[in-house]
Amino acid sequence: MPTETRSAPHDIAFKTADLSDRYDERVRICDPIFRDFGGRIRFCGPVVTVKCFEDNSPVKSTLAEPGQGRVLVVDAGGSMRCAMLGDLIAAGAVEQGWAGVILYGCIRDSRDIAAMPLGVKALGTHPRKSLRRGEGQRDIPITIAGVRFSPGDQVYCDEDGILVADGPLDLV
């Protein structure tokens, strides 16, 4: 498979700083508001989007599907009043092959999630679980941290930040 079109497997080394330097005109960089919670700090993959507020039903149902190395990006409205991801849903995401989750909101069970081979970026933690009303939207453009994410975009995450591109970048 040509390197310019492949999605990076979890073991490929990249640095968002280097990608930013190399592809400055092709990438969008998120505001530095996210904290790392997962056991995998460096992760990347095609974007799947969900928009929901204090209802993690669409997060749970999406992460129960085969991930195929994708990254779920969730616009949870920046809510700091409940968690949208916990250890059980995160463990399911690992089993289904998701590369990571970027959550504009909170998680819980952070110690357990830190031990999982899953990238997780979120605003913070909260012990309260979310409601489950079955509300939310999926596979729509969303804007979080000053950046627009669309389904099929490619996202690259590490300890320095989050970059988004319209498609895969050559990592070699």
Image (tube, rainbow, N blue to C red):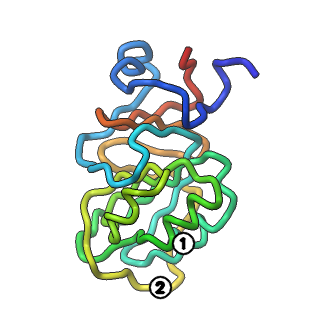
Instruction: Identify the residue at the far right of this view.
Output: 1
**Mark 2 belongs to which amino acid?**
Arg
Q: Secondary structure at mark 1?
A: helix
Q: Real-space Cα distance between discs 2 and 1?
A: 10 Å
Q: Is residue 93 left or right of residue 26?
A: right
Quarter-wise, where is residue 96 in the image? bottom right
Res 53 → quadrant: bottom left
Q: Is residue 78 above or below residue 134?
A: above
Mark nearest the camera among 2 and 1 is 1
The amino acid type of the residue labelled 1 equals Lys
- How many numbered markers are drawn? 2
Give coordinates of residue 6: x percent, y percent. Answer: 66, 27
| Image marks 2 and 1: residues in contact by CB distance under 8 Å | yes
Identify residue for label 2: 132
Tell me the SS state at disc 2: loop
Q: Is residue 81 above or below residue 47?
A: below
Q: Which residue does the numbered mark 1 point to in the structure image?
A: 60
Which quadrant of the figure has residue 170? top right
Q: Tell me if 105 is positioned left or right of 33 in this view.
A: right
Name the residue: 56% across, 14% down.
172
**10 Å neighbourhood of mark 1: few (<14), some, or many (≥20)?**
some
**18 w.r.t. 127: above or below:** above
Q: Earlier in the sequence, mark 2 or mark 1?
A: 1
Q: Position of residue 98 (x, y in %)?
A: 58, 53
Q: Residue at x 64, y 19 (%)?
A: 4
From where the camera sits, is residue 64 visible?
Answer: yes
Q: Split into 4 quadrants, where in the image is the N terminus?
A: top right
Q: Residues within 10 Å of mark 2 (few under 14, many from 20)?
A: few
63 sits to left or right of 124 = right
Q: Is residue 77 visible?
A: no
Residue at the far front in the pictured view? 115
What residue sits 49% from the left and 86% below the top? 133
